[in-house]
Image (spheres, rainbow, N blue to C red):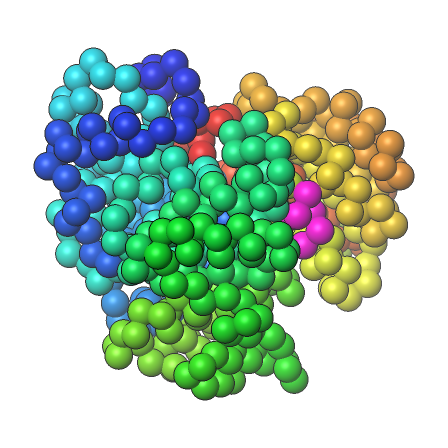
Amino acid sequence: MRLLSLHPKIIDLTLDRMHSILAKLGHPELKLPPVIHIAGTNGKGSTLAITLAILEAAGLKVHTYTSPHLVRFHERIRVAGELISEDALSALLEECEAVNGAEPITFFEITTAAAFLTYARTPADYLILEVGLGGRLDATNVIDHPAVCVITSIGLDHQQYLGDTIEEIAREKAGILKRGCIGIVGAQAPEVRDEIEAIALKVGARLNIANQDWQSYTQHGRLVFQDENGLLDLPLPALQGPHQIDNAGNAIAAIRALKDDRISDEAIATGLRKVTWPARLQNLGQGNLRAFVSPSNALWLDGGHNGPAGVVLAGAMQAMPKRDLVMIWGMLNTKHPGAFIANFKGLADFVVTLAIPDEANAISAEDLSRIALENGLKAAPAATLELALGQAARLYPQARILVCGSLYLAGHVLALHSGETPSAVSGAAKR
């Protein structure tokens, strides 16, 4: 993709270039509908998806900005509920390039500027804006007065950009908080919450904290949400896994903070029932990849890619009805594979390792197999996804097969399963 040549550094955290191009474009960031800004290590996408489903169940028009995409680049930019068209995206990017001229800019920055431009020009009730990386210096953090900020679960990830300790990472994520803004804080370790509270105090943001100001939990097969405004008895979210109770709590707390009379309790319930979000503990139905496994295999997909995500995913697998579990596992070399795979010792019966196709930063299947063995799991490498699926099915024809370890691997799986051609953006640029 030609835009990748616009700047030599794929990730370069600073806001100077964003402020410059947005000024040249007439400051579209000042003409947006009310913004719900979401940062965090894990759960950002699911929280966004639940929030979106609730707002749309209330009959509202919503823009969304997410990253990375899974199969098609256009997934990142939804305009009033519809994926941006190819013609519209091309025209916006050309407009942004023209005003930027020869000035340096990253791939993520120019696409963020293009997204802001179309959001400013198209009426909507809300914009849900997902941080790309970190928060404080992320290209999305040019919104001075967000309606609500949400900080989902924070853990160790992207240390090369955000800091080596969880406290440093928490400070970067909390950088989206603004004076007068309500900050919804999901369940956090005490040291993370302390850092977020310190930043909020410094900038003058008001916090609404999980398990202090609101609670979200299951009871008798229902989701219960409780805050100072009362108790809601709701259906469980359609997204699979116990961790989605926390993400649903984040979303409902954000919705309640909006104080929008158009959003009824029934809209919250309908949104929970109808929410979808691919590659988040997704049970793959019929598609091309079924040809490589036995009829009795269940095929699951998850894009979690760090230690905390491994904890959550292992917990979700353990909560399911007991069944043999075979993992097909691929990761990027920017991650910490041992911290992820160690969570599955004693849970996974076998791990088939795979280098993520067409990713220069993929860890080799052989290295991943060695890491799995070092962490007490049985493992062997495979050359392709199709061979990995076949190997898993031959060894365990009744098993639950879980493909996991990377959103980039998840995108490859979804493309093959549906027969789509993925957009030609890979590696760190895909964030």
Quadrant assignment for the C terminus: top left
In magenta segment, residue 309:
yes
User: Who is closer to the viewer here, 96 or 22?
Assistant: 22
User: In the shown orientation, is residue 111 left or right of residue 357?
Assistant: left
User: In the shown orientation, is residue 42 left or right of residue 75?
Assistant: right
Q: Position of residue 4 (x, y in %)?
A: 36, 20
Res 285 seen here:
no
Q: Residue at x 56, y 33 (%)?
A: 163
Outermost residue toward the left? 26
In magenta segment, residue 302:
no
Q: Position of residue 162 (x, y in %)?
A: 52, 34
Outermost residue toward the front? 202
Q: How many marks?
A: 0
Q: Residue at x 50, y 26 (%)?
A: 427
Which contiguous range is marked in magenta?
Answer: 307-312
Q: Position of residue 413 (x, y in %)?
A: 57, 39
Q: Position of residue 314 (x, y in %)?
A: 73, 53
Q: Residue at x 34, y 16 (%)?
A: 7
User: In the shown orientation, is residue 124 left or right of residue 252?
Assistant: left
* Overall secondary structure of the magenta section: helix
Quadrant assignment for the N terminus: top left
348 up-or-down from 211: above or below = above
User: In the shown orientation, is residue 356 left or right of residue 74?
Assistant: right
